[in-house]
Amino acid sequence: MKTLVIQRARFGDLLQTIPLVRSLETNGEDVSLLVSKDMMEISRLAFPGKEVMGFPGKGEILERGKASLVSPAAALRETMKDLLRQSFDRIIQTNHDGTGVLLGHILKAPEKSGFLSLHEGTVEGCEEESLSGWPAYLVSSARGIRAMNRIHLSDVWTGCGLPWNRRPQAPLRKSPPPSPGAVGIVLSGRSAYRELAMEDVASLAQRIQGTTGRRIVLLGRMEEREKARDLLRLVSGDVENLVGKTSLPELWNVVGSTLSLLISPDTGTLHLAAALGIPTLGLFFANAQPHETGAYASEAICLTPDMDCYPCVGEGSGCVKMECRSRMDIGYVGDLARSMIEGTPLPPEQKGLSVWKSSFEGGILSLRRIHPREATREDILAVLYRRFFLRILEPGYPLVPLEEEFRAHAGRGWPENLSGKNLVRGTFLLSRLLEGSRERFRLSVEFPFLWPVLFHTEEVERGRGNRETQRRAMDALSCEAEKSMGLLHRKPFWGKKRSEVSSVPDQGGLRKNILAKGG
Amino acid sequence: MVPSESLFRKNAEIFGSGGLINRVLGKGSMTDVPELLVSRSGSLTMKVGHLTLHSLYDPEREGLSWARESVFQGKTEGSRGYLVAGLGLGHHVWALLSETSLPVYVLETDPRRIAFSWQCFEWHRYAGRLRFFCDVVDARNLPGGLMLLVHAPSEKLDPDAYGSLRVMIHDGRTSEVGLRFRVLVIPPVYGGSYPVAQAVARSLDRLGHRTTFLDMAPFEGALRAIGAQTSLDIHKMQLRGIFQGFLDELILARVIHEKPDLVIALAQAPVSPTLLSRLRKENIPVAYWFVEDFRLATYWESVAPLVTEFAVIQKEPFLSLLSDKKVNHATYLPLAADPAIFSPCSPPPDDRKRFGGPVTFMGAGYANRHHFLKNLVDFDLSIFGTEWNAGDPLYRYVREGGRRLSPQETALVFNSTTVNINLHSSVYHKGVNPDGDFVNPRTFEIASCGAFQVVDHRSLLPDLFDIGAELPVYRNESECRKLVGHYLEDDAGRAEMAARSRERVLKEHTYDIRMASWLETLKERGVRPAQPALTGRWPVDRLLSDAAGDDSLVRFLERFRGRGSVGLEEIARSVSAGQGKISPEAATFLLLSEMGKGAGG
């Protein structure tokens, strides 16, 4: 089967498409890629042996268009000629934008998936149809309550291409990283909200050097060269400054061949390290969420701040304090890095920070807290919703037992700002209101925590999803809501022993009790 | 036609900016001195050396014939305006302006001829859509889609310059792309300029710009509620300040989302100096139309310095005051009418009865109107509008319960009324404000409906309408009564005057004309769309010429020949992604059009 994957986004997104392409390859599909023209060189490294075609970016179009409209038209026409000449059995369109949707329509193939319409707005010449399945989830998770999204972007894109049982169940083995290799520190991502303070980078570099003796390699964008020069005045020792000095292929080589560990905010370089099998320590703050865009690899470590406002909307938040970034205790980060380099146990929990570790379950990435602690409202809802969405998006997917999901929180208490009774009642009522979106949406007024689910099924999918599958998933959600109360409460729940609570059957026992009391 | 210095001054005041007046007043060459002659028909004509630039017999008739042919050609080619090379004395340009409502740009390389022409013609009447310039290079900055009209006698005097102009136009060094902006229009939350903002948005949309109207009306209730919470002014101010902060963030969020090329705000729009500073920092141009009396609404002092362009409806002393505050980006831009709403109609009998009458006043109950209209009640007066004092004896003449009428209902009032009374508001006078300057929108709207009005004297009115011929004007109650009494009986007189005033509005005072003119000013100030190639309109001939040698592209573009100019959206609409096979060319333009929709670069 000849498959075209359309991925016109930038460096980080391109790298996060690697799992999709590898999954397709594993299934015997002959994959070609349509990428942004300026990503062609790096795409050939990321997808060796694959046919890579370039689509002109807007910058090129505008530049050519200064003199005449014919110039960009002629350039784009050549690309379209090549594409239209080919015949594909399948097209997977990964970009939620008008150009991508239009490409998905123009190019003919018997089978198409991914973004073939927009959630809002129409594309001239294309039929208007609501999204469903994994593309719908990408929209609802991005526009919904992001703190509750626990499914990685790579898994969403892979889901657009293949069901779970046709994915590789474990990540492909990679060569071990060089040892003793250097430690790379990336200064920032594209946004000021993903930027480390220079003083912190300097302290971190000194600390790692001091405790491990490893060389430090500073990495970053061209625009940060001056910052890096200032930074060098604050550090001494074996520090190599490659900020703004590497092309993407050179960066590929540096990361893959010289580093034993990469420390980075949410950047394309982090994804590069993950793709090359280099251990990563991700620092996620502001609007960056490791569950969504963390390193797609096993045993990747991420840090997040324990703050009510995290994750925020980044640029649109107007936040000037960026206290979340200050929470990234550099001493602690240094200790974590040292443990990862030396293979020793990770340091104990640091107040104000959460440490996450990734693993693959049934071929889908999962991040779990390392340190036991009381679950937050978001922890509980995020776990329950992840399971709900995986049930409707990947029916039959083997979810790990709920006890495993809540291992770090078991018996440590239930958050005060989440009413267990309401959680059980609300999810139960939701499972009973199959038809009638108005009634369902009314539930979100009384039980606001149900909004992410309803937003997906009623607003984004507009009822296109399989109602029977949704009903069963909602039933399970309701049962698991109840079960989680038993698992997390400090004291035995409702006077019963923990062993009795954990096996409460559907429709029986405590849930009936709660519902009968109208709680 | 007699050359007049006062006429020269009037024209110079309007057209002489940007250094042109210095050229016109400067000492010219001693050769080829223009000479004025009287033609056989009695009007002036011009001669340079042995060459007559206009007919010695009937230059007006010659000009009219030239203009009619040019307009016919322009319509065929879908021109969006005219570039006339060669002014002479100006007979042909004068005729052209009366035959078309499109903008006209006049290149005259000899400033002395401009000087003569400005003494002889009332060019100032076309202030909104006429521009003069002296240098061929200035043609580079003109908008696209213009049809070049060469005055053949003038070309003979300066063939090199005209040759350069032709080359410049044909080899594409002029900015031929008809620029299309992505515009965000911000109206006030409520108030008199809200319908003006709506008209502005409709007009920009008609002119082909991608326009978003950020409707602030949903916040009217909240804003009014704030005022009702406390009687303490300081608390009201505090609460309003907090609310304004919220509106600032809301507008900023919309700006970030829409990524407009231009923000247009109307008077009383909730754009604080803080917000304006932030927009300025983000390099987002803001054009502000201050449609208020600067003496009463003094917030212009804090707004004007922060915006890219500040348009006003008054002239002196306001313009000088602005200049004193270093606001050098101010433009006089009078109000207008939207003929799409305010057009002649014959309302059905029920509507005529409900909305009309022999003598009607439409407007808010300002103090001067309360006083003034009491003297007209014997004319079977009807009053429409809000804020009329219910305790006042005049209230018995207020119809529709004193509610706010929609623009459409307002048009019905004008069309259903024999004599519309138009009296500008004043908080200080008991009737007519003898010093009143700006002209209210009602003046244009009534005229646009082809309805009859009597209007109070305003100092800026004579520039906009021919007093006596197009509008009857009164200065006091007695004069108003005389006019009302006369015109109630003079059906023919009413009809003629109303027809003339409507014609004037359609030619010079529509929102389309205002917005086109204002955008030209903005372009001159360097405001440009982020992606002109993808959002603008391209001359088809130019596209075909650029594509020469690429047969398939030429074949694709041939279908648009005859349209004059074309934009990407238009091209995309003509093809379809469809189910069947699509050509690479069709796919290309569909994709370019889609890329053009995306905000920013």
Image: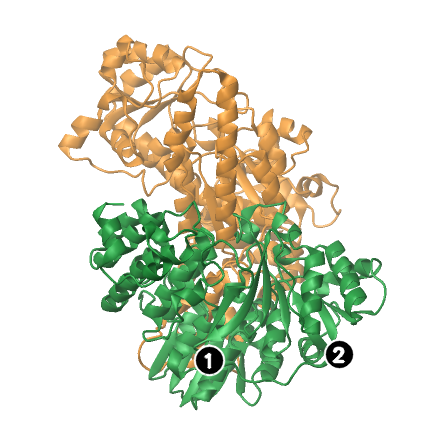
Q: Chain of mark 2?
A: A
| For residue A85, side relative to residue A357 (left or right) | left
Disc assigned to residue B438: none
Query: What residue sits 41% from the left and 10% below the top?
Result: B430
Residue A296, located in which quarter of the rendered image?
Answer: bottom right
Label 2: element kind: loop
Q: Residue under circle 1? A: A5
Task: Give the residue furthest to the left.
Answer: B349
- Chain A is shown in which shade? green
| For residue A365, side relative to residue A1 (left or right) | right
Counting every numbered tag in the picture gives 2
Label 1: element kind: strand
* Image quarter hosting the C terminus of chain A: top left
A124 and A279: which is toward the camera: A279
**Residues packed near mark 1 inside 10 Å, few (<14), some (14 to 19) or many (20 plus):** many
B72 and A324: which is toward the camera: A324
Which amino acid lies under the numbered mark 1 shown in the image of this protein? Val
- Chain B is shown in which shade? orange
Q: Residue under circle 2? A: A180
Q: Chain of mark 1?
A: A
Query: What residue sits 22% from the left and 16% below the top?
Result: B380
**Residue A69 visible in the picture:** no
| For residue B489, side relative to residue B226 (left or right) | left
Find residue A229 and report its horizontal and vertical position in percent.
Answer: 81, 61
Residue A59, located in which quarter of the rendered image?
Answer: bottom right
